[in-house]
Amino acid sequence: MKRTRLHLFASRLHKWLALFAGLQIILWFASGAYMSFMPIEEVRGEHLVDRQAAQPLPRNTDLSGLAGAIARYPDTRSVELLSANGKSFALLHLGHDKVVRVDPVSGIALAPLDGKRAADIVLAAWKGNKPSVRETTLLKSEPGDFRGDLPVWQVQFADQENTRAYVSPDSGKILAVRTDTWRTFDLMWGLHIMDWKTRENINSPWLFGFAVAALILALAGLTLLVLRWRKMRW
């Protein structure tokens, strides 16, 4: 009698939980399969743009103006010496994640990059045939495919991947490369963690609730398997 009741309870629980959580479980498997199949280098756009194009300065670089620049910014926490697209500069990292780009020879602060300069930096780091630049926009609010420091230059290219590169106007660094592949991957990630907006919260009550429901669903199915397997053997 107890076994019959357990079988009935497990069967009903399994059925209703399958109706409740079944779609999300399918999305978990589908999104997980997609993300595990796609090479992460292709998702990040590393096959298109070398984000490490900015290199350390040679040892014999003139740094005579660097001490004066640091004196003008006493809250400097660290100094980064770089060379990008044929030009050398120093990055003074200040408090609150602020960065000042200076000329290491004169020590004078350099103006933020304009759109053309930002596009030139990305094109210099492009691998293979360079596409044409469709548009450059200085963004002061986060777009859908970039979550980082603002303002930022968005450089759009006319290529098959609908590539967008994001360049810091202060440091001149390529912060991110976004393609249709990345945007699809980001969508799958959002479906996987059930954060459809920011794609960052893995501690949402939705995810926890469905994960518990999926666990109970699996345990109920296992219980049914054991009960029915014993009956089939008999």
Image (cartoon, rainbow, N blue to C red):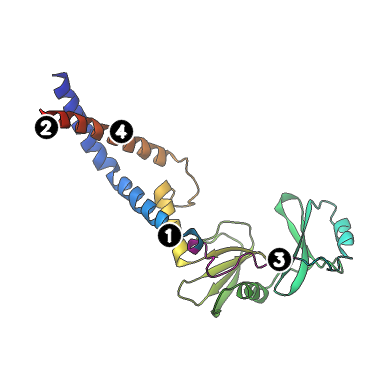
Q: To which residue does mark 2 refer?
A: 232
Q: What distance separates the C-alpha of mark 1 from that of mark 4?
A: 31 Å
Q: What distance separates the C-alpha of mark 1 from that of mark 3?
A: 29 Å
Q: Residue at x 88, y 65 (%)?
A: 65
Q: Are marks 3 and 2 in contact (CB under 8 Å)?
A: no
Q: Residue at x 89, y 61 (%)?
A: 68
Label whose residue precedes the other's in the sequence (1 or 4)? 1
Label whose residue precedes the other's in the sequence (4 or 2)? 4
Could you tell me which secondary element the residue under label 4 belongs to? helix
Label whose residue precedes the other's in the sequence (1 or 3)? 1
Of the residues shown, which amino acid type is indicated by label 3?
A: Gln
Q: Quadrant of residue 59?
A: bottom right
Which stretch is magenta?
Answer: 42-56
Of the residues shown, which amino acid type is indicated by label 4?
A: Ile
Q: To which residue does mark 1 refer?
A: 38
Q: Which residue of the protein is positioned furthest toward the front in this rendering?
A: 233
Q: Which residue of the protein is positioned furthest toward the left in this rendering?
A: 234
- The residue carrying pointer 4 sits among few (fewer than 14), some (14 to 19) or many (20 or more) residues within 10 Å by Cα, namely some
Q: To which residue does mark 4 refer?
A: 216
Label whose residue precedes the other's in the sequence (2 or 1)? 1
- 168 vs 79, left or right, is left
Residue 119 is inside the magenta segment: no
Please state which of the two labelled residues, at mark 3 or mark 2, is closer to the viewer. Answer: 2
Could you tell me which secondary element the residue under label 3 belongs to? strand
Residue 193 sits above or below residue 136 on the image? above
Q: Nearer the viewer, residue 180 or 233?
A: 233
Of the residues shown, which amino acid type is indicated by label 1?
A: Met
Residue 107 position in % (x across, y down): 86, 65
Q: To which residue does mark 3 refer?
A: 55
Label whose residue precedes the other's in the sequence (4 or 3)? 3
